Image (cartoon, rainbow, N blue to C red):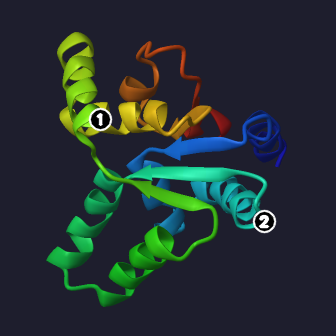
Amino acid sequence: MAQVEQFLKEISQYRSATLDTNAVIYFLDGTAGFIDLLEPLFELVEQGQMKLNLSVITEAELLVKPYRENNKEVIKAVQFLAEDFPNIEVIPVTRRIAREAARIRSTLGLKLPDAIIIFTALESSSEVLIGNDQELLQKPVSQLPSVILSRYL
């Protein structure tokens, strides 16, 4: 429980965050360990104490497996999260995001979806990037702080 408290203490200093796709998957799947961190995060968001930004790339990535498996329940859960959950905004890929993501990809060697998520965080004025992709979250990008979920397990 101390790890959850430490996680909440760290993220509570921020008013807006971008989630990497894996964090949302852990939340939707109720992944053991991670759900203990993410449920309180989503409660803060629901209560309006924090705003979450998601890249439209994250929304697309979340829907691939449910569409492949024709899992209508998960498709509805993703749609609810993206469209109706309070204080979550899905940010579209603009031309500026596309250009800057290409620049980030070329300099840091990230996959294009990861570069888009990083620049979406920067463009949406997120104060922190939260996820579990250590390669992504440890790249130095414009001093954007990051929180790696596995450090709290």
Q: Is residue 120 visible?
A: yes
Q: Residue 131 in the image: x percent, y percent?
A: 50, 41
Q: Spot the residue most to the bottom.
A: 72
Q: In this view, does 112 lie above or below 61?
A: above
Q: Which element type, helix, strand or loop, lies under badge 2?
A: loop
Q: Do callouts 2 and 1 mark residues in contact (Cβ within 8 Å)?
A: no
Q: Can residue 110 be seen in this view?
A: no
The foreground one among 23 and 56 is: 56
Residue 143 position by quadrant: top right
How far is disc 2 from disc 1 in space, using C-alphas?
29 Å
Q: In this view, does 5 lie above or below 108?
A: below
Residue 151 position by quadrant: top right
Q: Which of marks 2 and 1 is in front?
A: 1
Q: Which element type, helix, strand or loop, lies under badge 1?
A: helix
Q: In this view, does 24 lie above or below 67?
A: above
Q: Dot 2, crowdedness within 10 Å: few (<14), some or many (≥20)?
A: few
The residue under the point 54% across, 22% down is 144
Q: Residue 97, labelled with which disc?
A: 1
Residue 48 position by quadrant: bottom right
Q: In this view, does 57 lie above or below 64?
A: above
Quadrant the C terminus occupies: top right
Q: Residue 5 in the image: x percent, y percent?
A: 83, 44
Q: Residue 47, labelled with which disc?
A: 2
The foreground one among 114 and 88 is: 88
Looking at the rendered structure, the kind of residue marked 1 is: Ile
Looking at the rendered structure, the kind of residue marked 2 is: Gln
